[in-house]
Amino acid sequence: MNRRAAGILVFVVLVGAVIALLYLQTSGVRSSTGTTSSTTTQEIVSGFDWLTYHADNSRSGYAPTANFTSITLGWRSAQLDGDIYAEPLVYGGSVYVATENNSVYDLNASNGAVIWRVNFGPPVSGSALPCGDIDPSGITGTPVIDAKVGLIYSVAFLNPPHHVLFAVGLSDGMVRFRQPADPEGADPTVQQQRAALTLANGYVYVPYGGLEGDCGDYHGWVEGLDANGNSGAVSYQVPTSREGGIWAPSGAAVGPSGNLYVATGNGASTTDFDHGDSVVELSSSLKELGYFAPSNWAQLNAGDVDLGSVGPSFVGNGTIFQIGKEGVGYLLNASSLGGIGGQLFSMDVCDGAFGGVAYSQQEVFVPCTDGLFALKLDGTSFSVAWHSGSFFAGPPIVTGNAVWTIDRSGTLHVFTLDGTEIFTFSLPGVVHFATPSGGAGEVFVAANNQLLAFDTA
């Protein structure tokens, strides 16, 4: 071959390589390797990203999307490999779903196709635990996404029973690092990681409570693990001799200063205050800074009437809303929680609440055992604006001009912000305290081991 012909050949090869590279960059193909399952074209869909439980660290449950007039079922995923207790997360045209089989899926938000799947190992059988109502038990707490570094963090429950934090690349489903996640001195066979993870201050914060049935010597804990995978951890244990679980699905809320706020379940004492049935403020290094407890904390402890059946949420102007099994709603000053009986305002709201609330436009939407309640805020007080018919409401979210909630019996309900029901859909089944998520122009709803997407227009 002469020099001129060789030069032409090299030019053609280089042009072809550039064209191929541009195609790969613009087509959005994600390759699946290792334990991942399939490869598909990823269509990038514009829309709000939902990176953590209820969208943000204040736990607002609000997606600032456009108003809409119609709702239709967009797609159903294939059956995944386990039940879905964690809230689906949305980023960059994908929806990320964690299962009780210790798997995380990346699904195409446009059509539900599997882009990749990673499995961390076999989950723990219910027969290996002294009590509980999840079988098998794998990933229960909602993961969290760090979009800046392209990672999703999940805590898996593995055999023999122990908890491990996994950091997985969003682009390929490959494990970047793993860290032991159990607090020092904790018995993982009686500690359940049900509350959502929180990413803040360079840490992934991991809350713990007990199993259904309150068996064993469990405690409420928060473990803070380095988000870069470095060794060392910070930790907080609820100062009760037993119990005081931090188990509400919404997990810890974070204030503007980076301090965390968690709500606890009943403690062991009915005589000496032990931080059961409290809201506790923690520094970034998990040092206690303050607390609030209702005046009747001892009765709540004695009756298993957890204040911490719902996690704290910020509702504007440095104010926290808290409610629990008793159904009494509290407004708290985040900068000074007030100690025992130190609320700004309290009022009987409903028969009892579980999960997490949503907040939008000076209204708090509360999931109660006797329906969905909307509370109108007015300075440091609130009143009931409306409530739905009676059903066991799951944690709501707000997208645009509507609020969404899932009845524990398996019905999706959608209401306008003034309480008019505009849509219902019978799901094939749901786990306790299931909550939708919004993003990529859709609302995503987990139904046992399947994900459904609803289009709004």
Image (cartoon, rainbow, N blue to C red):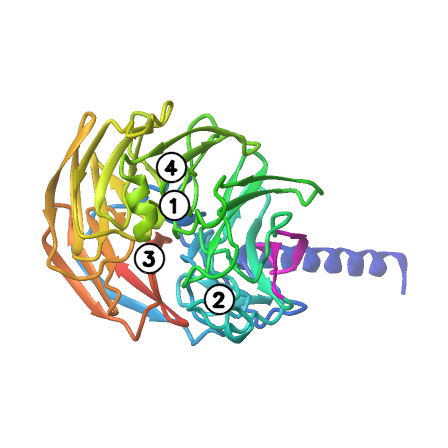
Q: In this orientation, does residue 241 appear?
A: yes
Q: Residues within 10 Å of mark 1 (few under 14, many from 20)?
A: many
The answer for how far apart the CA atoms under marks 2 and 1 are is 19 Å
The answer for how far apart the CA atoms under marks 3 and 4 are is 22 Å
Residue 180 part of the magenta segment: yes
For label 3, the SS is loop
Left or right, 335 with respect to 217, comes to left
- List the residue tagged with mark 3: 435
Residue 117 part of the magenta segment: no
Q: Are marks 3 and 1 in contact (CB under 8 Å)?
A: no
Q: Residues within 10 Å of mark 3 (few under 14, many from 20)?
A: many
For label 4, the SS is strand
Going from N to C along the chain, the mark reached first, 4 or 1, is 1
Left or right, 366 with respect to 173, comes to left
Q: In the rendered structure, which amino acid carries the disc numbered 4?
A: Val
Up-down relation of residue 35 to residue 364 (above or below) = below
Up-down relation of residue 428 to residue 193 (above or below) = below
The answer for how far apart the CA atoms under marks 4 and 2 are is 29 Å
Quarter of the picture containing the N terminus is bottom right
Q: Residues within 10 Å of mark 2 (few under 14, many from 20)?
A: many
The answer for how far apart the CA atoms under marks 3 and 1 are is 12 Å
Q: Are marks 4 and 1 in contact (CB under 8 Å)?
A: no
Stretch of the chain drawn in magenta: 161-181
The answer for how far apart the CA atoms under marks 4 and 1 are is 21 Å
- List the residue tagged with mark 1: 55
Residue at the image point whose x is 65% and y is 60% from the top? 174
- Residue 341 percent across, percent down from the top left: 28, 30
- List the residue tagged with mark 2: 99
Q: Nearer the viewer, residue 65 or 293?
A: 293
Disc sitting over residue 279 in the figure: 4
Q: Are marks 2 and 3 in contact (CB under 8 Å)?
A: no
Residue at the image point whose x is 21% and y is 53% from the top? 368
